[in-house]
Image: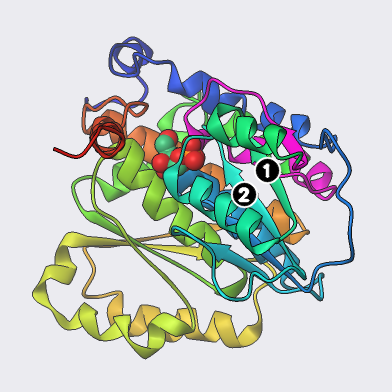
Amino acid sequence: MKDLDDLAAIRTIDVHDTREVLAAFPLQCRDALAPRADRPLTGRRPRVIVIAGMGGSAAAGDLVAACAADRVDVPVVVHRSYGLPAVATPEALLIAMSYSGDTAEVLSALTTALEWRVPALAVTAGGELARLAEERRIPRVIVRGGLMPRMAVGHLLGDAEIAEALDEISALAAELGPERPTAVNEAKRLAAAIGDRLPAIYAGPETGAAAYRWKTDIEENAKTFAVSGVLPEMNHNEIEAWRRPVAGGLHLIFLRDHDEAPEIARRFAVLTGLIGGSAGGISTSWTRGKSRIARLLSLIYLGQWTSYYLALLYDVDPWSVPLLEELKRRLGAPAP
Ligand code: F6R
């Protein structure tokens, strides 16, 4: 597909109406405002919170961890594997997060928590996680089902500050949808600017979770490789990779934060001078809103739409993830 303003062509490629799911993202976040655990969390204040999740569900964990960093005096660890890390003692709290409820790694984390007597909360749309939690009388937050996990991040959040973020992403929903022509649509323009190049997305420390989310959304929706990194850390390693000729095939995307520290702004400026000339192109996008969650969600939402339009440019259905599903199917089948 060449013309991102051709609505008829969009409908032909986007056969699962992903655009409608993305447009409803603000509503999804509104849904998350009411806390809905089906039984109260009892026990003492945890010393550490471990959020177990994979892929799109872990992304919600990254957001919670990023927002907690400057407000909550309890460490939040996002765990992306089987079992649990050693910090998960009976004085911790496990939040087992799986949209489908059938992700093996998350089920393993909950089973380990039951063995190790770690208090737990399950957040899911159903599946085995909902069943096991009910059987073991673990509080559950049941979210609405029927979506692709990576497009359900709004449901998996439950923070009161989302209210502030809602205004920002509702405004963005009106600005980024297919009906808005490329000339005034930042996501379409970004996708067109990336074109056939490999996107390299960099953000500052407070919005680093958004850069990683862009990478994974581009991989799952547009089915192409993407690189992501966080300043200042990438200044200490990844920066050297930009000396390779392959850098000319990359498109730099800087995700900047209106609230970023002067040190970070200076790093972006110096970095642009050093590697900007090696990249095939550069785009910069900015956060919206005041709270950390608004800033993160506004960037993430822009990334979702950008990856959507990139999928259309590549003529691929943004919704389906056949390899990911086939892998889960084969792992679930009895070993030969
Ligand atoms: C698929 C997607 C994946 C899943 C991951 C874990 O749309 O986003 O990254 O999130 O495979 O599955 P859930 O979220 O169901 O635990």
**Which disc is residue 279 wearing?**
none
**Does residue 141 appear to the left or right of 232 in the view shown?**
right
Q: Position of residue 99 (x, y in %)?
A: 55, 35
Determine crowd level at label 2: few under 14, some 14-19, many 20+ residues with C-alpha closer than 10 A. many
Determine crowd level at label 1: few under 14, some 14-19, many 20+ residues with C-alpha closer than 10 A. many
Discs 2, 1 touching: Cβ within 8 Å: yes
**Does residue 39 appear to the left or right of 134 in the view shown?**
right
Q: Nearer the viewer, residue 282 or 214?
A: 214
Q: CA distance from mark 2 to mark 1?
A: 5 Å
Q: Position of residue 24 (x, y in %)?
A: 62, 24
Of the 4 image quadrants, the one containing the C terminus is: top left
Residue 199, quarter of picture: bottom left
Relative to 106, residue 37 above or below = above
Residue position marked by numbered label 1 in the rendering: 122
Magenta extent: 138-166
Name the residue rendered at 85%, 47% in the picture.
Answer: 160
